[in-house]
Structures are given as structure tokens and as C-alpha cells.
């Protein structure tokens, strides 16, 4: 218990209240001191009693021995008492040690030397603080929290788990700190398997140090999801805690080994914990009376698993737990604690995770309302004659005055088969039907009535009346099949349709005849299956396939039309052309994937005054609309420049044309360039398009882009012109983005690759455009590519 701070009185408060607050604070502090003193005295008296029992000395002599041993080992008296209590049970001998029990008098040497006397001073001081803190620990959970608080700052411990060995050799989690309830519930019961570090530590009687997750995971089953949550961990046995054995796990998130100091510290911790674990009070026993004994005798004679529970209520009146007044021998098995008897114990003490299960809510509901509760069937593994088998059980809770009777009913094989058959019919949406041809009696399963949408109160339909349930167009085929089955015993598998309140259903009836010794059909067995969902899926698939084929034909026709239109609009020369003293080579490569023809285009013409007009553009989208927009832009741009418009003026008018076209969402990019041969001056403007690439003296660079906006993006575009003087031998490449944009590669990387390819040796010779395209383009192009390769003749060529 810790004292609570007292809030100082407000200035000007009543003097009697201030004094009263001071008195209460002093009383609380004194009460805490007295409680600590009483708990410490209880530990000392227990240790003295242990020494007296083992040596036969007097109380004063026992007290003196404890003081002397504490002084020699540099322990506090309380720490020495904890170690003495923890060493009452024999521990497993270590390697090279003689077997046998070492009593308190041999504390300084042997396996019971639980705290090294030569431990560093800081470890001894830390253990002394832990010994003082253990006085207030009353449960294993408190102990885990105390250890985590003690070890977290000292060696970066992140979690503590305390396991106790069960009678069957497995482990039970009795205390934990630093882990969530879900993980604790998952690892609350550990079976006696190999590869469990805590079990191996208990079996060997030595700590198990796991300091490398990668190698430890291959040979151990590590706790945690994922196991890398704790990268180093130690499992330390506390065999002196009792005959069952207790193991403490220290889990750390950081990687690395436990230092010798850490190991000495942890061994000392287990020595102190052994005494604390032995000092825990046993669960209070039941108050034996004749009524309870009579009930237990009755339960002992019952061949089923059952318990009698009494509610334990909190101060608020709510039921916080149940006490098991009586239980049959098999109750512990079904509660997950085989071999243990729950009678006389609290239910949640026996099984803490029960509050998360439907059975707990069923108990509370039955106690509050008096209505019986019956759980859903569940599977439980049983071991009979050494063989594990799954059995099906249901739990039932009934109120008996102010108590509850909980029983478990085991379902027989016939019940399970019937349940499985019902599940099969429900999941497969099918049912069985039998017709007796001699008595004209019929029987249907419940699912058949549901399939036909027929009220079960009306009874099943005779076999000869089955065609009457089908739609008129399906009835003749079903009538012939039934007639041949009844007369000749010919089985059939026939689809037909019926009309129900939910609409038309597609059914399937499979029937066969059972004949007598003369071969005459006497009984018919049949299966009815609802195929509506499957039939609808088939019809939807057929409709989808037809729509796909139709769309494919439309797209193919559109692609063919667009391709022909594009080839008519973009005639490609078979050889380079000469314009205004320039040698111009063009290339257009359509996309190879199954997309529509794109809107990439070019124009290279000589103007009336002798200048050359060079244009490349790209209309967004594909198909006939893109090709039509491309044609508008191509011819309009050429016409406006020929009639005297500036490059920026032409771009502004083309932007207006797109904004007022039939498709108001059309956009395009473009580069317009005008070359004057007399001044060798290139004037150009762009609208959201990659800049031309200039190659001079073996070096490639992109021209600086003037301001220019995407065509069709805004009503107030801004365009500017840029000027560049071309020298003899220069090479200028205008292109669309299909040449440099190949996802997942970025377009910036594509521009770098183009510059590297053009500047490479042997990349500037005649007819070099083809090899350049082969180097730049992938095997399958997803976009059109349009390139205009312009060369200024050298001095010798001129």
C-alpha cells in the first residue's frame, strides 16, 4: 500500500480543515510504515522458523544465524530471509556437483547459493531494493509487475512471464507483465512439447539464454507475434519454489547477449523470488458442511461433466466470479485443466480466460433471468486408451435458486452425422427426397421444402405430381423422365425451372429407382439441387462474352479506320527530304499493344518565302477522335504559319480551336519551329511538349524551353518564342513523348538515355535514325512514336 498525497488547503481555508488534512496525511504514512513492518516481520519470522525446524536451534540462535549470514554475504536481513525461504526445497545439481540437499547452513556454497556473495555492489544494492519491494507482493501477477519495474531500467527488460509446471508436465502462465491480454491468453497453457525454452530450463535445472533470434527460432518455439518482437530472452528455473517448479522469463526487445553482470543479477532475482513464491498463501478452502458434502457425493456419482456454482458478488452487487461448490471428475477436462479438481476454487482462478468466452456470458444471463443457456456445439480433444480423438459437446447452464448448474452434454455419432447432413444440405443448397411407389408415400428433407418454396405443412408432392411444379415449357421433359423411371427404372438427371415467391428458380433433379427381386421399381430416391445462382452466373458470363466480342469488333473496326485515316494524313517519305537547305528524315511508329491508334503527328514543309516549318505534336487519347483532332491541328497550324501568323499566335489560335471543338475535353502538346536558311536562325515555341535535342560537335543538349502551356487547358494561355542559331554539322531532333516515356522508368531518365544514345560514337552517320529508334524503344510499344531528324549540312556537304 502506498500513501496518497494530500492536496494543500486553499489559502484562507478554515484552520480546522488544514489541521485535519495534516493529521490524515500523518496517519496514512504511519499506516503504510506499520503495514511494511508487519509484512517484513512476517518474512523474518518465517525464515527463523525454517532455520529452527532444520537445525533444532532456539529462536534467538536462529535470529543470530540469519544476521551472521546476511553480514557475511553482504545482504540485508530481509534479503537473506527471502533466500532462506527459497532454499527450503532441493534444487537440481549443476554439472560436476554432488547430488543431495543443501540446507540453510551451507548457504555460501553449492546449488542453493542463489545469490553470489561476490556480486558487484550495484547488483547487491539492486537485489536489496527488490527484497524490500517483495514484501508488498501478494500474487504472481504482482510479482511479475514488480520484477518488470525492477529489471526494466537495469537491463532493458520489456516483459516478464512466470510459468508453473502442471501435473501433466505442461506449463501454466500464473503471472505476466508487459504483454497484452490476447497474447497471455494464447500462451496461458503450454503443452509438454519439445522446443519450449521454459520447459527445457525446468528439466535441466539451469537457465536458458536465447540471444540470437535467427538461430533460436530454428530450434525453439518462440513466444511473440512476430517472434522478433523480443530479440533476446532468458528463462530461469525457480525449482525451490515448490515441487511443481516455476520458471521466470525475462524478454527484451533489444538484441545482444546477457552480460555476466546481468546473469548474476538474474540468478539473484530468482533466489529472492523463490522465497516469495513459497510464501504465497494457498487458495482458501471450502467451509465443509453436510449439505456441500452431500452435493459433492451426488456429483461424484454422475457420469457426465457438471459443476455447481455459487456467485461471488462485488460491493456494487455485480457478479465478479463464481465459487465451484461441487464438480464431477470430468469437469476439469472440459475446462482445459485435465487432472485438476475445480471444487472449492474460484472459477476465474481456475480458468482466467473464461470471461472472454460465450459460456461466461451464458452464466451471467442465466443467473440474472433464470432462462437456461445452451452453447453452440464445440469440438474437444479427448485421449482414450492413449489415442487422441475429437468429440462434440454442448454446455448447458441452469439456475438452481441462487446457484447455477453447468453441465456438458456429449453428442453421439448419430447426432453428429445428422448435423453434418443438415450442414451439407444447407451449404450445397440441396436436399433428398424418397417416393414409395407401392404406397404412394413421399418424404422430403427440410431443405427440399425450402428449395421449392413450399410450406412443410402441405407435405411433400408425389413423384407423378412433380411435373406440375415445373414451368409449362419444362413440364413435358420432366413427365417423360418420371414415366420412364417408374416403368423401366431408368435413372435421370434433369434440369427444370419452377416459379416461387422469390421468382424463377433453376433446379436439378437426380433420381434413381430401387427394384424388387423381379426388377420392378418399388421405390425412388432423389436429390433436388437449386442451381439458380450457377445458372445466373452462366447466363451473365455468356452475355459478358457476347458484349466483349461485340466491343472487340467495334474496336477493331475503329482501329482499322483510324489507322487508314492516319496513314492518309501522314504520308511517310521513303528517303530523306531537303527543305531550306536542311536534310530532314521523319519516322512514325504506331503502338504495338492492343490500344487504339494514337494522335502523334509531324509536319515538315518549305514555306513560300523559302523558310522551313518543322512541327511535331501529340493529341491526348486514341482512336478516331484523336486522329480527327490531329488532322485539324496539323493542317490548321500549317495554314496559319503560311498565311503569316507568328508561332505564338498560331499556338494561341489552336488553343481556341480545341476549346471550341466538338470534344471540349481534347488537349494536345506541340512544338512549332521555323528555320531561316539565310541567317541559319531557328525560332521555336512549344505548348507543353518536350524540347528539341541539339547535337553539336558530339555533345547533346536540350534547348531551353520557352514558356508554353498545354493546348486546350485554359482560355488565357501564355506562349513565348525562343531563338537558336544552327551551325553547319548540327543535328536537331524533334520527337513525341513515346520515344522517351516507358513506365516504370521516369520520363527524366528517358530523356537522359536519348541524349546518351545520340551522343554515342557512330550515332551521327547517315541513316542513323533507324538504329537510334531500335536502341531507345522496348520490344513492345504502348504509345505511338513520332520523330523529325533535322541535319544542317557541313561545310564540305554544302
Image (cartoon, grey):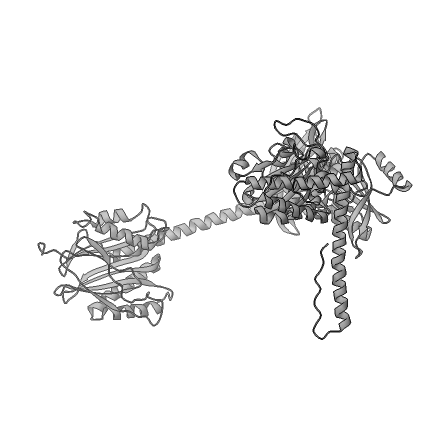
Is residue 342 visible in the rendered image? The answer is: no
Query: In the image, 536: left or right of 705?
Result: right
545 or 514, nearer to the observer: 545
Quadrant that contains the N terminus: bottom right
Measuring from the top left, give residue 7's x and y in whole percent: 70, 66
| Viewer-nearest residue: 134 or 738 | 134
Question: Residue 430, image x and y in percent?
Answer: 65, 41
Of residue 470 and residue 15, the one placed in the foreground of this image is 15
Instruction: Check the image and name the residue furthest to the right.
Output: 290
Look at the picture and state if 373 lies above or below 483. below
**Residue 158: percent from left, percent from top:** 59, 47
User: 463 left or right of 571?
Assistant: right
* Residue 364: % across, % down: 77, 50
Q: Residue at x 34, y 72 (%)?
A: 716
Camera sees residue 126: yes
The quadrant in which the C terminus is found is bottom left
Picture residue at 62% right of the left edge, 47% below the top: 126
Q: Looking at the rendering, which quadrant does residue 687 occupy?
A: bottom left
Q: Quadrant of residue 513?
A: top right
In the picture provided, is 789 more to the left or to the right than 527? left
Q: Identify whether 680 is placed above or below 553.
A: below
Left or right: 369, with 238 as reference point: right
Total numbered circles: 0
- Outermost residue on the top side: it is 517
Amino acid at each position: 500500500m502506498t500513501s496518497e498525497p494530500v492536496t494543500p488547503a486553499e489559502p484562507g481555508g478554515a484552520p480546522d480543515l488544514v489541521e485535519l488534512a495534516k493529521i490524515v496525511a500523518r496517519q496514512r504514512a504511519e499506516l503504510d510504515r506499520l503495514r511494511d513492518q508487519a509484512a517484513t516481520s512476517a518474512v523474518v519470522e518465517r525464515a527463523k522458523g525454517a532455520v529452527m525446524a532444520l537445525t533444532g536451534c532456539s529462536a534467538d540462535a536462529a535470529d543470530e544465524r540469519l544476521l551472521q549470514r546476511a553480514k557475511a554475504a553482504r545482504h540485508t536481513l530481509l534479503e537473506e530471509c527471502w533466500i532462506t525461504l527459497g532454499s527450503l526445497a532441493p534444487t537440481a545439481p549443476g554439472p560436476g556437483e554432488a547430488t543431495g540437499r543443501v540446507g540453510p547452513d551451507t548457504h555460501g556454497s553449492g546449488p542453493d547459493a542463489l545469490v553470489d556473495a561476490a556480486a558487484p555492489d550495484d547488483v547487491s544494492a539492486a537485489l536489496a531494493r527488490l527484497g524490500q519491494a517483495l514484501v508488498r507482493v501478494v500474487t504472481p501477477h504482482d510479482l511479475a509487475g514488480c520484477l518488470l519495474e525492477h529489471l526494466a531500467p537495469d537491463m532493458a527488460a520489456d516483459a516478464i512471464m512466470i510459468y508453473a509446471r502442471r501435473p501433466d508436465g505442461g506449463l501454466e502462465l500464473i503471472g505476466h507483465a508487459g504483454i497484452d491480454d490476447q497474447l497471455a491468453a494464447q500462451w496461458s497453457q503450454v503443452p509438454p512439447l519439445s522446443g519450449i525454452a521454459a520447459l527445457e530450463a525446468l528439466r535441466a535445472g539451469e537457465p536458458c539464454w536465447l540471444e540470437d533470434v535467427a538461430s533460436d527460432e530454428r530450434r525453439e518455439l518462440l513466444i511473440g507475434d512476430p517472434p522478433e518482437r523480443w530479440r533476446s530472452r532468458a528463462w530461469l528455473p525457480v525449482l525451490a519454489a515448490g515441487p511443481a517448479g516455476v520458471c521466470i522469463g525475462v524478454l527484451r526487445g533489444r538484441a545482444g547477449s546477457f552480460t555476466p553482470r546481468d546473469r548474476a543479477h538474474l540468478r539473484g532475482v530468482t533466489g529472492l523470488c523463490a522465497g516469495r513464491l513459497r510464501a504465497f498463501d494457498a487458495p482458501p478452502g471450502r467451509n465443509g458442511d453436510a449439505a456441500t458434502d452431500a452435493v459433492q457425493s451426488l456429483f461424484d456419482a454422475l457420469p457426465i461433466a457438471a459443476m455447481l456454482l455459487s456467485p461471488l458478488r462485488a460491493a456494487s452487487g455485480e457478479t465478479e466470479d463464481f465459487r465451484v461448490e461441487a464438480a464431477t471428475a470430468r469437469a476439469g477436462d472440459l475446462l482445459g485443466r485435465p487432472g485438476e479438481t475445480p471444487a472449492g476454487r474460484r472459477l476465474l482462478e481456475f480458468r482466467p480466460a473464461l470471461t472472454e468466452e460465450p459460456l461466461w456470458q451464458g452464466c451471467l444471463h442465466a443467473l440474472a433471468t433464470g432462462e437456461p443457456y445452451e452453447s453452440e456445439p464445440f469440438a474437444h480433444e479427448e485421449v482414450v486408451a492413449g489415442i487422441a480423438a475429437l468429440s462434440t459437446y454442448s454446455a448447458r447452464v441452469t439456475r438452481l435458486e441462487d446457484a447455477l448448474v453447468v453441465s456438458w452434454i456429449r453428442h453421439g455419432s448419430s447426432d453428429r452425422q445428422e448435423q453434418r447432413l443438415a450442414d451439407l444440405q444447407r451449404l450445397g443448397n440441396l436436399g433428398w427426397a424418397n417416393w414409395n411407389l407401392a404406397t404412394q408415400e413421399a418424404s422430403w428433407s427440410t431443405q427440399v421444402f425450402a428449395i421449392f418454396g413450399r410450406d412443410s405443412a402441405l407435405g411433400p408432392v408425389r413423384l407423378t405430381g412433380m411435373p406440375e411444379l415445373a414451368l409449362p415449357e419444362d413440364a413435358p421433359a420432366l413427365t417423360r423422365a418420371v414415366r420412364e423411371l417408374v416403368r423401366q427404372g431408368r435413372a435421370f438427371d434433369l434440369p427444370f425451372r419452377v416459379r416461387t415467391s422469390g421468382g424463377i428458380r433453376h433446379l436439378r433433379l437426380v433420381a434413381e429407382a430401387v427394384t424388387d427381386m423381379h426388377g420392378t421399381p418399388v421405390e425412388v430416391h432423389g436429390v433436388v439441387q437449386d442451381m439458380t445462382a450457377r445458372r445466373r452466373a452462366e447466363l451473365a458470363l455468356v452475355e459478358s462474352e457476347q458484349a466483349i466480342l461485340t466491343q472487340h469488333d467495334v474496336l477493331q473496326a475503329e482501329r482499322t479506320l483510324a489507322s487508314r485515316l492516319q496513314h492518309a494524313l501522314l504520308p511517310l517519305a521513303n528517303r530523306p527530304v531537303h527543305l531550306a537547305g536542311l536534310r530532314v528524315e521523319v519516322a512514325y511508329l504506331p503502338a504495338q499493344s492492343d490500344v487504339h491508334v494514337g494522335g502523334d503527328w509531324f509536319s515538315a514543309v518549305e514555306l513560300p518565302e523559302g523558310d522551313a516549318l518543322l512541327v511535331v505534336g501529340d493529341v491526348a487519347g486514341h482512336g478516331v477522335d484523336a486522329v480527327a483532332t490531329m488532322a485539324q491541328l496539323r493542317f490548321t497550324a500549317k495554314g496559319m504559319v503560311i498565311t503569316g501568323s507568328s508561332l505564338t499566335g498560331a499556338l494561341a489560335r489552336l488553343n481556341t480551336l480545341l476549346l471550341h471543338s466538338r470534344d471540349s475535353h481534347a488537349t494536345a502538346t506541340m512544338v512549332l519551329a521555323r528555320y531561316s536558311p539565310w541567317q541559319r536562325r531557328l525560332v521555336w515555341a512549344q505548348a507543353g511538349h518536350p524540347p528539341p535535342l541539339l547535337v553539336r560537335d558530339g555533345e547533346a543538349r536540350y534547348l531551353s524551353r520557352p514558356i508554353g502551356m498545354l493546348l486546350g487547358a485554359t482560355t488565357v494561355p501564355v506562349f513565348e518564342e525562343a531563338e537558336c542559331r544552327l551551325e553547319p554539322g548540327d543535328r536537331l531532333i524533334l520527337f513525341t513523348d513515346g520515344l522517351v516515356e516507358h513506365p516504370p522508368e521516369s520520363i527524366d531518365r528517358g530523356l537522359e538515355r536519348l541524349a546518351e544514345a545520340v551522343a554515342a560514337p557512330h550515332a551521327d552517320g547517315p541513316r542513323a535514325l533507324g538504329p537510334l529508334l531500335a536502341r531507345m524503344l522496348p520490344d513492345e510499344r504502348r504509345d505511338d512514336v513520332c520523330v523529325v531528324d533535322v541535319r544542317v549540312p557541313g561545310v564540305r556537304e554544302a
